[in-house]
Image: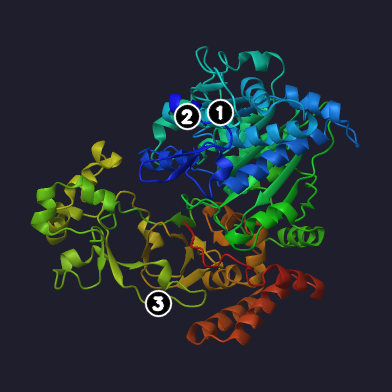
Amino acid sequence: MDNLQKRQAGHEGRLPGGFAFSLREEDACRAVTPSVLEGLLGRFLTDARRSGTVYTPGFLVRWMAREAVSSWLESRLPSPRSGDEEAGLLGSIRVLDLSVGAGAFTMGMLRELVARRKLLEPDCPEPDLIRAVLEENIYGVDVCAEALEVARFRFRCAWLAAGGKGDLRDRLLCGDSLDMSASGVWRQGLSTVMEEGGFDLVIGNPPFVGEKGNKELFDRLKCSSLASYCSSRMDYWYVFACVGLDALKRGGVMHLVVPNKWMSNAGAASLRRKLLEDCGLLRLSDFGACRVFESARVHTMTVLAEKKGEGGRRLVPEYRRFGGSVNDVESFLEHEPYRRFPLPEDAGACVREGLSFCSAAERHLLEKMEACRNFRLDAAKEMTQGIVPNPDVVSSRALENLAPETVRRYGIRRGDGVFVLPQGYFGLLPERERRFLKPLYEPVQAGRHALKAPEKVLLYLTPSNGAEQAVTLLRHLEKFRPLMEARRETRMGRMKYYHVHWPRQERFFRPGPKILAVRKCARPTFSYTEKEAYVMMAFNVIRSERVSMKYLAALFNSRLMQFWFLRRGKMQGDFFQMDTAPVLRAPIRVPGLPLLREVEGLADALAARYCPEGDERMNGLMEDIYGLSPQEREIIIQACSPMRAGRESLPE
C-alpha cells in the first residue's frame, strides 16, 4: 500500500513480468487494475459456488447503479431539476449493498455518485468527492473477510488514483446481513442509519443458494426472526430481498440482479407477497435464455423495486424480456422499452401461482380456458416424481470420495454405472434376479407422439421387494458401498446401502396406460406408453383410471396447452420447467366420447407415423374442444411461434 500511495493520478507502474499496472479501473483494457482481484477471488475461494458467490459483469453493474440513482432522484425532484437540489440529495444519499463480495456494486455506486457530483460541483476536488462518498454514502456488508479486503483495496486505489492522501475510512462491515441478533450488523454498524429511517438505495447481487445441500443454513434461518420470509423450496436470496426492502425508507429504491425463477417458483410466494404489498414501482428486466454470468449456469433478471410511500399508487408492474445473444444485452438494457401489465383484481393469485406478464387479450383467453376446466388430477394418487437412485453413475465428486485402492482394484472411472447400467451389462442372470432390472427411460427417448426403446436398466432394489436375493447385483454394488453409506437415509438406518435412495410407488411404472412427463424441455413433452417404464427425476409420471391417458397426453402436447404453460407455468430461460405444480394447475377439459375417440385415433396415427398435417389437425381439435374463436387461435399461434433466441442454451 505504501508503494501504491506514491503513485499519483495518471501514473502507472510495472508488475513483475513487465505487465502494466494502473490504479484506475477504467484502464482495464490496457493495464492490470485492482478490478482483476475480483475475478481472482472467485477462483481461489473454494466455497464460492456453495456460498452462491457470482461476480457481476461490469456493464450490468454500471447500468444498475445508474438506473437506481436515476429512479430515486426522479421520485424526489420536480422536472426541470435544480442542480443545487440534486447535489444536496446526492450528498446525503445512503446506499447499502447486503452482499458486497469483492466490491463490484460498491465500486459501481462510487463511480456513479462521483461522476454525478463532479458535474454538479465542478469546483470540488475529486479526492474530496471520493472521500465524502466512501465515508458518508456507501455502506456494505459481507460474511467473507477476504472479499471485503479486496473491496477496501479497490476503494483505496480509486482514491489514490485521484490524488488522495492520508487515511481513508469506509463503511464496510464484516458480518451476516441476515443476522438480526443484538450482536449483528443491524444493531451495530447499521443501527444509526436505521434509526434515522433507513437507506435510500439497496443494490447488489445477493447469494444464489438453494436448499439442496444447505439444510443447516436454511434451518437456522427458519428458526430466526426472519422465518416469515421463509418457505420450503426457497432460495437464500429471497430473504435478502425482503430484508433489503425492510431496510429502505419509504420511496427508497432496491435494485438487485437475481435468478428469474422467483416469478413462478412456489417457494417464492413470500417474496412475491412482499414485493406486491410494499412496492409502488416494480420494474423487471428479464434476460430470458441468455446467461449474462460467465461463472454461473443460471438465468437471471434485474428487479428494480421502489418502496411505497404514504398513500402510494396502485402497483402496475413493468416488464421486458430479452431474446438475443449476450453481445446485445447492453443495447437491450439501454433501449428496450418496458411494457406495463396491470395486476388482476385477485392479486393473491399472483402470490400463490406466480407472476405472469401477458396482454389483456391473452389474459382473457387464459381465463376462458380456466372456465372450461371439468377435470383435475389428484396430486396424491395420480402423479409422482421419478426415482432417485443416488448415485445413478459415478460422478467426479463420487470418484474423489472412493478410496484410491478401491478405484484401482476395480478400475472405476467417472461415468461408470452404479444403479443405472447399459442393457445387457449383466449378461445372463437367474430369473429371480432379472426381476430387479427395470427398463429405464431418459428424456432423449421421449417424444410428443412416441417413445423410443430404452437403452439402460435401473437396479430397482428397495426395502420392500426382497432386494437381498439379488446376489449378483449386490456384488456389483459392493464396490460402490462407501458412496451409498454416506447417504442420509442409509446413515439413519432406514435403508441398506444397496437400496435406491428414494423409491416410488411401483404401480406408476408397471405395464398399463401412463404418461411420462419430461420436466425440462424446449416444448411440453408428455409421452404416452402402456409398457413397463421406470424413470428418474428428469420425469414426472401421470397415471389415472378416471380419464384417458392417451387423450390427456395429446392435450398436454397441444399448442393450446403450450400457450397455457408458457403464460401460467414455469420457465427457465426459453425452456419449460414442468414441475408438478403447473401440471396440476393446468385447465383440463375432457370432451364427450365421440370427440375423445377422435383424438385417441389421431394420436395413434401420429404415433405410428408423424406428419405435420396431423399435428395441426390435433391442435385444431383441442382448440375446438375449448371453443376458441379464429381470433383466439391466432393469439395462441403468435405466442407459440418458435422461440426468438437462446435455443442453443441447455436447461440446468
For mark 1, give the secondary structure: helix
Identify which residue is drawn at 52% across, 32% down. 154
Whether the residues at callouts 1 and 2 have beta carbons within 8 Å, the answer is: yes
Q: Amino acid at mark 1?
A: Leu
State left or right for residue 316 relative to residue 645: right
Judging by the rendered image, the residue that carries numbered circle 3 is 452
Q: Is residue 373 above or below residue 176?
A: below
- Camera-near label (1 vs 3) is 1
Q: Position of residue 440 (x, y in %)?
A: 33, 66
Pick the front one: 297 or 428:
297
Can residue 390 be seen in this snapshot? Answer: yes
Whole-number angstrom distance, CA of label 1 to CA of label 3: 66 Å
Judged left or right of residue 233, residue 457 is left
Q: Residues within 10 Å of mark 3 (few under 14, many from 20)?
A: few
User: Where's residue 341, x and y in %?
Assistant: 78, 51
Above/below status of 520 relative to 258: below
Tag shown at residue 4: 2
Q: Is residue 398 left or right of residue 574?
A: left
Residue 209 in view (yes/no): no
Colour mode?
A: rainbow
Q: Quadrant of residue 645?
A: bottom right
Residue for badge 1: 160
Q: Which callout, 2 or 3, points at the residue further toward the start of the chain?
A: 2
Q: Position of residue 339 (x, y in %)?
A: 78, 53
